[in-house]
Amino acid sequence: MKRKKITCVLASLLVMSLCVTAVFIQAAAGEEKITIRMQTDEWYHPETRAEVAAVTEEIMNEYMRLHPNVTLIVGDYMPIGDFYTWFTTKMAVRDAPEFVYNLRAQRMMQKGWWVRLDEYLKEENPYIPKGYLGHDVWADILPQWMWEGVKHPDGHLYEIPLTMVGGCTLYYNKDKFKEMGLTVDWPTWTDFLNTGRKLKNAGNGVGIYMSSGSSYRWIESVVLTAFFADRGEDMLLPEISENYAGAWKTWRILGPEELAKAIYDKKFNALDPRFAEYLKVIKDLSETWVAGYATLSRDEAYSLFGMEKILLGYYGLFSLTPIKEAAAGVCDFGVVQVPAVTKEISEYATGEIYITGGAPPNDGFGITTVAEDKGIVEECIDFLKFWTTADHFGRAAYAFPALTKIQGAKINPELAPFMPVFGYKTRLFQDYTTRLGPKAGDEWLRVTQDYIGGQISVKEAQTKFQKILDDAVKVLAGEHKWEWCK
């Protein structure tokens, strides 16, 4: 990589008890030197995404050429579990990076770890040319519905969701499917389940891959939507719908207050017979999952796809590159959407396909309150403005490749097979981890695991889920003083 008129050294350092790569540029005389530490997940993972890492370095260098008093240091990639443990420890001693791709963001909001971005997003972004969306009002880089998708239950914004999950999709091994006489033409949910059962019965731990973390959150929200979609429009609050245009006025992911009000009005109720039907679908599906799904990391699942131990896996659009690399020289692979839950399963099922495409409520770029401790929030915000333009992050997204909704960003043609997915309706419910706050999300997963594992019955699960819902509404209503909650 050629760089002119700058002194640039790439070096491995031990910083924050973490090996990092740093790009140093000498500060201009007399200017205060500022260091911004970054942790960007797979946006800097040279071992598996060298091209993306190179683009990230280019963006950092471009910023530092404009601001010679600023040093940007980017940390090495860590798997999500390792990152969460490390980050929690670092925040406890106030030594975490200032600029972070905040995985599991909404699970950590209540800790006071993130800088509130609402007021900054109303400012202009000088790094976007005049006349382009986002220059006058920074938030205009993204459509309004994406901001609503990442709004915390307290009503504020702490992250910028630059990419879309991409209508999380099933990747399948075309060669093995042909060899086993299997098809991805699933007219009914039963046909889909039967494919999963055949894979499971093939032995050697084969089955459908859906991780106990991210993948399960996605499928759970899609299936739940299928059983309550006919009540969806009635759950939307008119005063919130006024902020939307077009189809989003009558169909979108429920916000925290909308869901809480629906629970309060018993429009969404775990004791409802349709909720019992939803639980049965989830349990039947879980019986097709690959052996060890509860502990498999995403990277391990990619490797198993390449080893032909996973023949059908529920991944995101972000998985395209690692799946392509794992399958290289081994098999041809394709992508297919999870089918609709159809009427033969339940009278309550709508028979429509719903997708998880949209702003992931757990993944976005934010500024930690360590920046407040150091008095460099304004500098971090300035870099975040620089990072979030079509010319900067748009290049990284193209290299990834990832789908970004930043106005003016160029879309990588490799994503073409995924684009039809966005013609379907989005899910009605957010991930269970973020619907009603982290505590409710943790309890939701525990009850689900007990039910899937056979420790409790459907009725017992319904009772426990309803308590989670009622308790969460009381907590949120108490915090927000919602007038409708007496």
Image (spheres, rainbow, N blue to C red):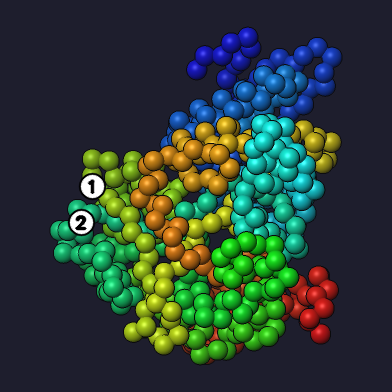
**Quarter of the view holding residue 382:** top right
Q: Position of residue 454 (x, y in %)?
A: 45, 82
Q: Tag on residue 176?
A: 2
Q: Position of residue 118 (x, y in %)?
A: 76, 51
Task: Report whether 422 appears left or right of 474.
Answer: left
Question: What's the amino acid at mark 2?
Answer: Lys
Q: Residue at x 54, y 56 (%)?
A: 358
Above or below 239: residue 162:
above
Which sits in the foreground, 234 or 328? 234
The C terminus lies in quadrant = bottom right
Q: Is residue 150 visible?
A: no
Q: Tag on residue 28?
A: none
| Structural distance between the alpha carbons of marks 1 and 2 | 8 Å
Task: Report whether 429 appears left or right of 205.
Answer: right
Q: Residue at x 26, y 64 (%)?
A: 184
Q: Position of residue 135 (x, y in %)?
A: 70, 37
Disc 1: which residue: 331
Q: Label 2, secondary structure: give it.
A: helix
Q: Residue at x 64, y 37 (%)?
A: 132
Q: Label 1, secondary structure: give it.
A: loop
Q: Residues within 10 Å of mark 2 (few under 14, many from 20)?
A: some
Question: What's the amino acid at mark 1?
Answer: Cys
Tell me which numbered mark, 1 or 2, is placed earlier along the sequence.
2
* Residue at the farthest top position: 5
Which sits in the foreground, 186 or 244? 244
Contact, mark 1 vs mark 2 (Cβ under 8 Å)? yes
Q: Is residue 210 visible?
A: yes
